[in-house]
Amino acid sequence: MQESPLLLPSIIGEPPFVTYSWAAMVFLLVVSLIVRSSIKLIPKGVQNFVEVMAEMLLNLAESNIGHMGRYFFPLIGTLGMYILVCNFFGLIPGFESPTSNINTTASMALPVFLATHYYGFKVHKFGYIKHFVGPMRSLIALPLMILMFFIELIGHVARPLTLSVRLFGNMIAKHKILLILGILAPAIVPTAILGLGVLVSIIQAFVFVLLTTLYLAGAVEEAH
């Protein structure tokens, strides 16, 4: 079983997923420049689509993070648009989805993990540790606090792994299903599966961004 040849060859000896990652970035830059050069009071076309996406991501950030939602919007908006474009690349014949490679998803999950704890300490200083020990503060509950600390620590360390593997697994599974069904029934099945692929691409981009906002919200909120 042979996969279709890639339309964009590797550049400077880099693997294909790096090439398509750069292609996604170039695509987003070109679209942003087009929208910027033709901004109208009543949006239409590409500007209308971009504004809808930006407003949706901004509302997601503000509804989950609160007053700091607009502060984190550049990070959340960039992740959302980039992941969505990368996911859609896998639906184009001859293209490869960069998010179907664990290196790409890990390169996004790790900065989210670092940003979460950076802003946690920046907002709460050393008091950020209270987020890891639960609501108990007495010496009697010290053993439970220590146990809670290690449980929370394991959960936080596992976050970049789960973010990476979830997106990577769903994208590569979608790609393989499209490939296999396209070979078995090239005239019928791919059309229906392609629609499902669009839905999966949107949902997985939303899930990644949603989890990012929840992690950031948990880091900057007041510990109770």
Image (spheres, rainbow, N blue to C red):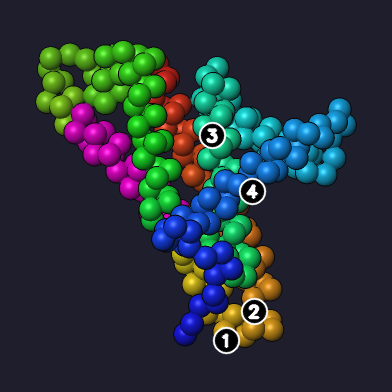
Question: In this rendering, is residue 13 above or below 144?
Answer: below
Is 12 inside the magenta-drawn segment? no
Mark 1 or mark 3: which comes first in sequence?
3
Crowdedness near tag 4: few (<14), some (14–19) or many (≥20) residues, C-alpha within 10 Å: some
Q: Specify the amino acid type for callout 3.
A: Ile
Q: Specify the amino acid type for callout 1.
A: Leu
- Residue beneath the point at 15% across and 27% down: 146
Which residue position holds label 2? 189
User: Looking at the picture, how far across and down is residue 174, in whole percent?
Assistant: 52, 66
Which residue position holds label 4? 27
Q: Main secondary structure of the magenta part?
A: helix
Residue in front for this viewpoint, 37 or 97: 37
Mark 1 or mark 2: which comes first in sequence?
1
- Residue beneath the point at 62% across and 70% down: 93
- Residue 98 relative to residue 185: left or right: left
Q: CA distance from mark 4 to mark 1?
A: 33 Å
Residue 132 appears in the rendering = yes
Q: Specify the amino acid type for callout 4.
A: Phe
Question: In this rendering, is residue 159 above or below 96?
Answer: above
Q: Secondary structure at mark 1?
A: helix
Residue in front for this viewpoint, 104 or 223: 104
Which stretch appears magenta?
148-170
